[in-house]
Image (tube, grey):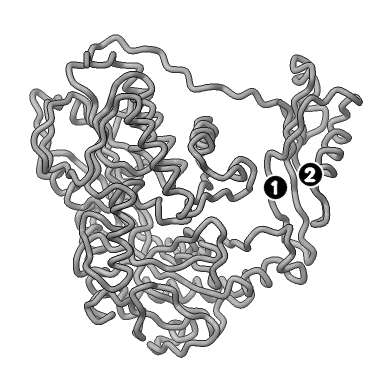
Amino acid sequence: MLLIRNIRLPLSAGKQQAVEQAVRLAKLPKGAVGQAEIAKISVDARRKTPTLVYTVAIRLKDEGAEPAYAGSVPYVSFMQSKPLEIKKGDKKLEFRPVVVGLGPAGLFCALLLAQQGFCPIVLERGAEIEKRMEKIETFRAGGEFDANTNIQFGEGGAGTFSDGKLTTRIGDSLCAEVTRLLLEHGAPEDIAWRQKPHIGTDRLQSVIVSLRKEIQRLGGEVYFNTRLTGIKMQDGRLKSIQTTQGEIPTETLILAVGHSARDTFEMLSNSGIDMECKPFSVGFRAEHLQTEIEKSLYHDAAGHPALPKGEYQLSHHVGNRCVYTFCMCPGGQVVAASSEEGGVVTNGMSYHARDGKNANAAVVVSVDGNDFGQNPFAAIEFQRKLERAAFAAGGKDYTAPAETVQSFLKDAGQLRLGAVEPTYFRGVTPYKLGSLLPAELADTLRTGLTAFERKLKGYTSPDAVLTGLETRTSSPVRLPRAENFESVQIKGLYPCGEGAGYAGGIISAAVDGLRVAQAIAETYLPASN
């Protein structure tokens, strides 16, 4: 396949014009093209009138001739997809592998293991999607909070409620494999070519269920409402695990618990497993009118049907720290993402249509091991302290503290609402958000927000609202592992995904899950069923 990049066309253009331009640029003979598709569309909004930038994928009728055209001009390249190849292992397992966590890492790890005949057992502390949604809707309506089934825990993990963003910077060849599997199980077709692909929380749920059912069809088992409570070792090797449903013998445990499994981290530490302190960030959720964001990004072209929903990514360094936006959700809403009683945690999500009135994004400041004496549990306690402070500030009923951006910049604690109506579904109450954070972090956030206004006009407008606190940007811990993905301390234990400190989003977590499964499949033979 040939990829022809950097095809710049006006908003009025379409697929036909992009393909015609690609054929001209690549100097392809008439009649040589067998198939042509749009591989990617992005928007260049740096000038007053945005343009669409296409990448076109072309297969020639004579596929063997394709390499000869690669490099004919700088933006023509030859791509040959490489399927995941697994060399069979030779060490026979006595028991089936156990995967803990059914977020992206655990889901894709279990799927590949199932495809290779290992019939894995999957443990998920929360409920399956349907019951998970019932619990979340109850909480949304002001009802009881469930510490095991919520926006952090349950089938699909925390990623289920994050807009289904598929952007990543890891550049791993398995990213394409993850996309292929998502498409195979019902993800929207445009994730194959959008510059910033997303599935949407509503569409992602059915994709997750389809992937889980495929694991079960291939012989895997999934135990919901089942939590890992202990591990048993002998001579440095895993022998079995303890769960809330009893003991399970296994020599291979994939730990894909997600970034909020604090009780699991504590259990592992008490079992003698070392952990490292990892950088993460804390701050707020910022909400603006989606239309105003698009005016700032697209100028006079805002609202043009060819343009995607406006997204932004901002950052500003202040000394050794960085203030940046994270998990931007166009047309979305701010959600209550607590995983422990007595704590307020905010996150953002949007549906596939992204048709909500507000845009929201995390505005956070970085912290790292130097802030906590390199003690990962001091970092966890820091998160917990902030969440409990936010809970108290909101009135101890999961209402969130909030104030306008201008009020935060002045440390005034005011929430005089204008055009932006906060979307946090448990409600908000006025509060000095800066008082919930260490003074240095609050001041650093103020400096960052002021810099954002220079980069994106209107970011600190009088209508913009901040809701707090955002504390779960990523895992504060990392479980050390070797190059073969196995724990450096315990044979048979495989730290995996975001919770273990090796991923930062749906795609990177899914890729890590596939890599761990590949390592296991290339070492072992499945146990006899």
N-terminal of the pair, mark 1 or mark 2, is: 2
Mark whose residue sits in front, 1 or 2: 2
Q: Where does residue 461 sit, x and y in percent of width and height?
A: 57, 82
Along the horizontal axis of the image, is 211 left or right of 394? right
Res. 487 in view: no
Q: Residue at x 67, y 71 (%)?
A: 296
Disc 1 packing (10 Å; few <14; some 14–19; many ≥20) = many
When asked about the image quadrant of residue 309, the answer is bottom right
The quadrant the C terminus occupies is top left
Residue density around tag 2, few if under 14, some if 14–19, many if 20 or more, within 10 Å: few
Q: Is residue 467 above or below residue 368?
A: below
Instruction: Classify mark 2: helix, strand or loop.
Output: helix
Q: Residue shown at 29%/9% (left/top)? A: 90
Q: Is residue 410 above or below residue 156?
A: below
Q: Which mark is residue 15?
A: 2
Query: Could you tell me which residue is drawn at 50 percent across and 73 percent down?
Result: 287
Residue 191's tag is none
Residue farthest along the top direction in this orientation: 90
Instruction: Give whichever of 410, 3 is nearer the camera.
Output: 3
Query: Quick one: SS at disc 1?
Result: strand
Task: Specify whether 521 is left or right of 380.
Answer: right
Q: Viewer-proximal residue, 152 or 74?
A: 152
Q: Is residue 317 visible?
A: yes
- Residue receiving disc 1: 41
Q: Residue at x 42, y 87 (%)?
A: 415
Q: Could you give the CA–CA distance between mark 1 and mark 2, rounded to whole angstroms?
A: 10 Å
Kindly indicate the quadrant of the structure image that contains residue 70. top right
- Figure quadrant of the N terminus: top right
Q: Is residue 464 left or right of residue 47?
A: left
Give the residue type at disc 2.
Answer: Lys
Image position, residue 448 (x, y; %): 50, 71
